[in-house]
Image (cartoon, rainbow, N blue to C red):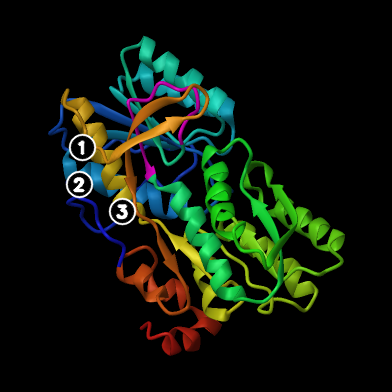
Amino acid sequence: MVPLLGLSMALTACGGDDSSGGDSGSDSGSGDAAGKIGVILPDTESSVRWESADRPALEAAFKDAGVEYDIQNAEGDAEKMTQIADTMIGNGVTVLAIVNLDSESGAAIQEKAKSQGVATIDYDRLTLGGSAEYYVSFDNTKVGELQGQGLADCLGDKDANIVYLNGSPTDNNATLFAEGAHSVLDSMSNYKVVGEQAVPDWDNEEAATIFQQLYTAADGKVDGVLAANDGLGGAAISILEGAGQAGKVPVTGQDATVEGLQNVLAGTQCMTVYKSATQEAGALADAAIALVNGDDAETTGTTVDSSDDSEVPSILLTPQAITKDNVGDVIDDGGQKAEDVCAGKFADLCTKAGIS
């Protein structure tokens, strides 16, 4: 199971109200805390996690705390995120948490909020040059280290050509994932990087095109793929399937999505990284409610903003590497449902993995 930090995260099981995504907000809670919290999620394309995991976990955390809230999704549009933020501020949120689409627009939102007396929190992604009171996320360098070590474990000691399929260049997390992976793999002289490229906006379709180009440029001599998340990993797997190499070339991932876990069970993806949405949502709720009440949040340290070397008070959680041997940990933790992961042709694979 994923280790819990010493944070006050007494959460109920993930659940939600009638709001399911898109433009619709979720105003609820009994109002035990004297304030209102706004959360803007980034999109529905880069990862299914935002609506399938984070939204219900956040709703459960805020309802459990009895605080009024509004959760909306910017659908990958920075201008729309700015408009949502303006509306939330106008509607009286006292704390605004964002998952920025890029640091420039995120910092502008935070500056506007600050001028209106609204406290801000960076959720999952650090806004470089921003003014957030807190940063709530997982240790993203550690995520990359787990991916790098996972790929090394799958490749073994043989000489191997590696392709990196990195996340969006506008996402600071993607930089940290890549740095973490390189810190592990670059020290292993038997591995050679034969291609590396970032995928704009984490676009899975573009990732398939990019990987096809990298694969062709390497004359198909690719032995391992360091893919930054399950969506990008799935894109690489689709190209490898066309070349008859799926399952023969290890591919990494992240987010422990249903598809990612199914690929791990099927052997076409060697590992993924699990980041409990319940833990992250609980940490955000704790920090936001502390701000609403005029208190300091309990932090685990600071994170350096590379744009100006400032230190942002942070709550960083611990990610977990997931392989075929421990897919059940994600289900046991509530990260995914067995009936979703084990549907159809994956039922027998789940049984073999001890998942029921």
- Nearest the camera: 148 or 213? 148
- Residue at 29% across, 56% down: 14
Q: Is residue 266 above or below residue 213?
A: below
Dot 2 amino acid type: Leu
Q: Please give the range of residues in magenta.
A: 126-137
Q: Is residue 15 above or below residue 152?
A: above
Where residue 289 sits in the image (x, y, percent)? 21, 33
- Nearest the camera: 169 or 263? 169
Dot 3 amino acid type: Thr
| Residue 256 seen in the current view | no
**What kind of secondary structure does the magenta stretch mostly adopt?**
loop
Q: What element carries label 1?
A: loop
Is label 3 in contact with label 1 (beta carbons under 8 Å)?
Answer: no
Disc 3 and disc 1: Cα gap in Å? 17 Å
Q: Is mark 2 on a helix, strand or loop?
A: loop
- Residue at 35% across, 11% down: 116
Dot 1 amino acid type: Glu
Q: Is mark 3 on a helix, strand or loop?
A: helix
Q: Name the residue carrying label 1.
A: 298
Hey, which quadrant is residue 320 in on the image? bottom left
Query: Would you say residue 131 sits in the magenta stretch?
Result: yes
User: In the drawing, what numbered circle is on residue 7?
Assistant: 2
Is label 2 in contact with label 1 (beta carbons under 8 Å)?
Answer: yes
Where residue 324 sits in the image (x, y, percent)? 47, 78
- Residue at 50% across, 18% down: 108
Q: Is residue 100 above or below residue 316?
A: above
- Judged left or right of residue 207, residue 310 is left
Q: Name the residue carrying label 3.
A: 278
- Judged left or right of residue 137, residue 164 is right
- Between disc 2 and disc 1, whose residue precedes? 2
